[in-house]
Image (cartoon, coloured by chain):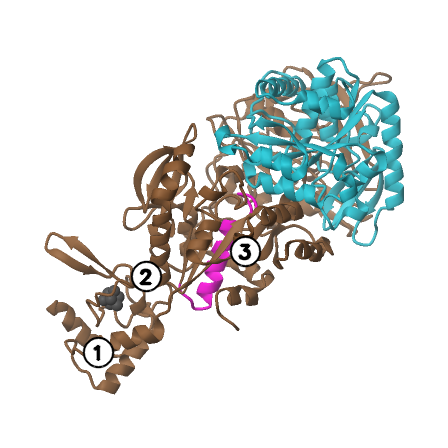
Chain colours: A brown, B cyan
Amino acid sequence: MDCMRKKVNEEIKRGWIGSNCECPYHPAHFTHQDCSWCYCPFFPCNDRTFGCEVETKHGPVWDCTDCLFIHRTDVCKFIYEEIDRLGIEDANDTRFKDIFESAKKKYWKKGKALMVVGATSDAGKTVTVTALCRILHDRGYLVAPFKAQNMSLNSKVTLFGEEIALAQDLQAKAAGLKNPDSHMNPILLKPKGDCVSQVIICGKPFKDYDAETYYSEFVDEVGIGIVKEQMEFLKDRYDFVIMEGAGSPAEINIYDKDIANMRAAEIADADVILVINAEFGGSFGYAVGTIKLIPESDRKRIKGIVMNNVRGDPKCFGAGISTLEEITGVPVIGIIPHADVNLPKEDSESLRSSEQGSGPLIGVIKFPHIANFTDLDPLLLENVRIRYIEKPEDFLGVAAIILPGTKNTISDLNWMKEKGIANSVLKFKGRGPILGICGGYQMMGKTLDDSEGLENGEKKVYEGLGLLDNTTRFPSYDKCIRRDQGKLNIGDLGEFTGYELHMGISEVNEKPLFTIEKMFGDPEQEGSVREDEKLYGTYMHGLFDKPSFRRHFVSVMKNDFTENCPAKDYDASVEENIQKLADIFEKNLDMKTIMALLGVNE
Amino acid sequence: MSILFLGTSSGCGKTTVCAMMCRYLHNRGFDVAPFKASNLSLNSVATSDGCEIGMAQAFQALASGIEPDADMNPVLFKPSGDRRMQLMVNGKPCMEVNETAHADHGMLVRTVRDAYSRLESKHDVILCEGSGSPAEINLFATDIANTGLMKSIGVPAVLVCDIDRGGAFAAIYGTWRLIPNELKPKMKGFIINRFRGDIRLLGDSLQSMEELTGMKCLGILRYERLKFPDEDSLIISRGYLSGDDANEAFLLNLDTMISHAEEDGFDFDSLMKYIGLN
Ligand code: SF4
């Protein structure tokens, strides 16, 4: 205690310092925190709004772990002003008690909660809460994320050895908080299969429940109490609590037992915004149905609709938006364009590659205009794994590369060069098979001649990857549409079937891959192959349907590609993506309404 | 004799459900053909007479035991980026559609109607698939594949919903509610697709949905870990496929799906009745 008083005395003499970025522990609590009172002059304040009493070997001790109040700049400055005004010189001065009371009166207010619910589980609730946490943090507020109940297999361990969902950990980081804790996700359900989940309460394993007993026994007896308690805890310490719902709030079969959505909003007395994923269409139906199926008394809380993940022109919703507002009585407060961000994903459903198993890994370039990707489905008949490649880092470990079809060869070729993917493909050459199909095949050539501007609008000649000695021209708006069958020119010379759908004609200076057999007339040669360099190219869609080529391709894959893959600092990339996401939301969300819902009238 | 499979969103499984029904009727000796008035798709296939149609209809034709035919998908839009699309009409490139160049709505309606009549004269039963969600209130005026098709050929409809994403009840109710009132009597039933979990948890909610909408619940299809050709989504590499020939593997999966549906008490009889088969 004496030692502490000494430190406080030093702080009194030294005066206000603001955020101390020099300190090796900085920031111990949150970004931009005020470090003037590293040792609290109020200790022990014995006020449970900020700290709590814990039992130790040496008896009860006042614990300040969760206190953020003393790190608010306005509070820190106020303390110095009062010290000056009252002429305090020593840490033992009893008048600190009065300063504490007036600081609390002046600067503490119970926090306000706002809830984000989603029409579906993939609505984008997590990213919306993440974005809001960051936007509000950037505006200087203390914000905490909260999800009453999360069902997830992906959890993180907090500084205090508790387990919380990955999403809340991420959101807490977006809010600038250094130590995400279990208050932010007090109930975590970890599915164990067969409808049984392990229930984690405040970060510690509690008990296994099956779905039915969870709803009939746990929810009312234990669950509600926990949500109430943790919500109060956060509201005491933060300006705002941004809550995330779970699944849809309109599941009429479990409505009364659902503590993750509208009941949590009621407990927190929070207004609610409804997020809808527009990517799969049906947004209007989902919005109307969700709002209408929620009982009147709860429906009143819904104050805004956000259309998320909108591809294309937001104007395409046209008059639909005003009709929707009329039917539901809820305004649309944001139309958020699809955001190309890379953040840790919560549920496996959004993982679109198939990397389970032990087979060799095929990297498929995920062109922005990727087309006819069903060509790859039959590869599942072999023991292989597939990964979609969007950046050079994704090449790590691949044993083969496929450049699939695209609806816009030129623009996707440019995209591939800009992203550095073209470079990685060239470096991969010789290590494993590289296959181009249709548009991907055209890219593998030396030149792509669009001097009529038919493929990409601009009249220009483009340089291909140069893997094959071919030239493709786009001389007219004609399209080759035909079905083919015949024999493979390599491997077991087995049969193939397929079809061609392409604009553009290629002048081929390579050994052909297929011999197309015609009902009438001479056979034709198609495609390109360099067996020694493991390069393959063809216009033939459906080429993996029959086993011959498929098996040949898989047999050529052996060594994987582990070098030359730039590794990026993961935390830095997460931080970068959070900021990008927040910027997109801030630009497209009616922040005035959001602030008003949080009780701030700008 | 026909029915239209509508979906509460794209990717809800209407393609697969329609293919399953094609297969079911084909296995029972019916002469059945698939039809999708208008398709927005990146995956397409060439027919034997050099026409291009959506991948999904080719797959459904396979399930029906017939050759793909341009009449099965008379209008096909192929996005090529920057809000540009290639419009294929009757299997051939027609024009580039972009912000300033639109396709003539009257022409598309006529194309669809003509293709449908040709197909109807060739086959006994036509199983239609809608496009995206039928409840896009901003698109009602120009729709040709959902409510537009219901109006132009008077086909009854059932609604397919993916329950795995959550919000299924809201989706069914909201979609139904936004369907124009004069078409609501044609909305015969709904199908819950991709169900996993404890069926007891659904309680009497399905009955409530029937009461709220007047549509009959035709059944709950389980979450299948089977691989089918996916139309629009990039979720290509999930699911089970076995054998040597990809097409045969797909058919095998459809048969498995049918036997699962029968096991789970799927109401094929009511569906047959709505189609007009007794
Ligand atoms: S809880 Fe906060 S205000 Fe109270 S003594 Fe601890 S640090 Fe100071």
Q: Which residue is pictured at 24% across the width and 61% down the height?
A: A64
In the rendered structure, which amino acid carries the disc numbered 1?
Ile
A244 drawn magenta = no
Spatial separation of the CA atoms under disc 2 and disc 1 = 22 Å
User: Which residue lies under the disc numbered 3?
Assistant: A273
Residue A251: % across, % down: 53, 41
Tag 1 near tag 3, CB within 8 Å: no
Q: Chain of mark 2?
A: A
Tell me, yes or no, whether dots 3 and 2 are on the same chain: yes
A214 over A59 or under it: above or below: above
* Sequence-earlier tag: 1 or 3: 1
In three-dimensional space, the C-alpha distance between marks 3 and 2, rounded to whole angstroms, equals: 29 Å
Q: Disc 2 residue type?
A: His
Label 2 in the same subunit as label 1 = yes
Residue A514 visible here: no
Whether residue A128 is in magenta: the answer is yes
Circle on res. A29: 2
- Amino acid marked by disc 3: Ile
Pick whichever of labels 2 and 1 is earlier in the sequence: 1
Say whether mark 3 is within 8 Å of ligand 1: no
Look at the picture and state if B48 lies above or below A353.
above
Check the residue under mark 3 and report the chain it is in: A
Cα gap from disc 1 to disc 3, whole angstroms = 46 Å
Q: Which picture quadrant has residue A536?
A: top right
Q: Nearer the viewer, residue A68 or A584?
A: A68
Crowd around label 3: few <14 · some 14–19 · many ≥20 (10 Å):
many
What residue did someone put label 1 on?
A12
Between A16 and A556, the one lying in front of the other is A16
- Helix, strand or loop for disc 3: strand
For this view, does A166 lie left or right of residue B133? left
